Amino acid sequence: MTIYEQPLHEKTRVLLRLEQLVRRFNFHIRDEQRESSEASLLILLELYNLAARLDLKSEILKEIDRQALVVKYRRENGMIDTATEDDILATLSSVNTKLYALNGPLGQRLKTHSFFNILRQRSNLPGGINGFDIPMLQFWLNKPASARIKDLSYLVEPYRIANEAVQVILLLIRGCSRGEQTTAKNGFYQATLSQKPACQLLRVEIPDNVDYYPEISAGKQRFSVRFVEIISLEERGKQIMEDIEFKLTLCSF
C-alpha cells in the first residue's frame, strides 16, 4: 500500500520536511562515492535553510511540551493506561533533554563553519557548487571517504538530534488515530475537519501500482480528495470518473 500525507498546519509541514531531508541525507552518507558526498552537502544546505525560516529547535521543544500535556490529559480521562503514559513521557523527556542540550539554534554549527559558508554563498547560482569555482570543495572531495563521512556526520548532528525528536512527535500523531475505509464517488471525496481535537495530518492509503494518485486540498474547516488518473508524465492528469476505495486517516494528538 502507498500512503499519501497532507499536513494541515505549517508546523506539521516543517516537521515532515525535516524528516524527509534527514532521511535523504542518511541515504547518501552511507555511500562512499564523491557524488554522494556532494549530494549530502546539498541536503545540508536545505536543512540549514529550513531551520533558518523559524526557530525550529524552539518549535520542536514546544511541541514536545504540548504532547506531554496531551498524554497526561488522556491518562486522567482513562484514554491510556499508566504504563503507556510512563513510556511515552519517558521518550518525550529523553528527546527533549538531547535537543535542549544543543547550544543555540540548529544551524549554529553551520553558520560559523567556513567551508559551509563558502558553499552557501554559491548555492543560489545554477551549478554554482563545483570544484572549479570552489577549489576547497575539490580538495575535500579528494579526501578519503571515511574523512568525508566524519565531517558530514559532525555537521548534520544537530539536525539528526532534532529529527530524533520529530520522529517521536510524528509517531504519536500518525499512530493515535484509526483509519477508515472510504469511497470517493466518481473519484471525489469531501468532508469537514474536526476542530476539537484539531487535525494535524491527513493520510490517504491506496494500493500500489495503480494508475492514479490523490490530490488533497484542505482548509481550516473542510478538505477534499480528488483522484487523478495519470497516463503520461508529459500530460496533465484528469480526475478519474469511477468510485475509488481508499483508507482515510485524520491524525491528531
Image (spheres, rainbow, N blue to C red):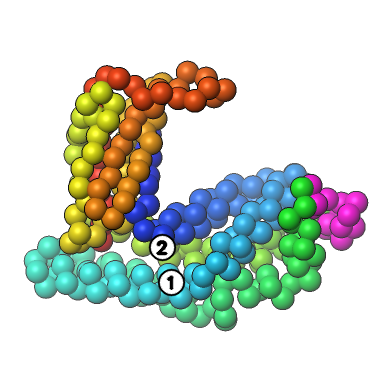
Crowd tier of the residue under label 1, counting other residues whose Cα lies within 10 Å: few below 14, some 14–19, many 20 or above: some
Number of numbered callouts drawn: 2
Q: Residue at x 73, y 55 (%)?
A: 124
Q: What is the x, y in percent for residue 134?
A: 87, 57
- Residue 127 versus residue 143: which sits nearer the camera? 127
Q: Report if the CB atoms under discs 2 and 1 are less than 8 Å apart.
A: yes
Tell which circle, 2 or 1, labels the residue nearer the N-terminal end: 2
Residue 48's label in the rendered image is none
In this view of the protein, can residue 103 be seen by the observer? yes
- Horizontally, residue 38 falls left or right of residue 109, namely right
Q: Residues within 10 Å of mark 2 (few under 14, many from 20)?
A: some
Is 177 displayed left or right of 112 in the figure?
Answer: left
Kindly state the secondary structure of the residue where label 1 is placed.
Answer: helix
- Residue lying at 61% horizontally and 62% vertically, measured from the top left: 49
18 is higher (above) or lower (below) than 66: above
Range of residues picked out in magenta: 127-140
Residue that mark 2 sits on: 11
Q: Position of residue 57 (x, y in %)?
A: 49, 72
Q: Foreground: 192 or 67? A: 192
- Residue drawn at (36%, 33%), measured in percent from left and top? 214
Residue type (three-letter) at the residue carrying disc 1: Glu
Residue 226 sits above or below residue 147 on the image: above
- In the picture, measured across the screen, residue 250 lies left or right of residue 126, that is left
**Which SS class for mark 2?**
helix
Q: Is residue 241 left or right of residue 155?
A: left
Question: In the rendered image, which residue does mark 1 sit on?
Answer: 59
- Residue at 48 percent of width and 62 percent of height: 163
Q: Position of residue 51 (x, y in %)?
A: 55, 66
Q: Is residue 135 magenta?
A: yes
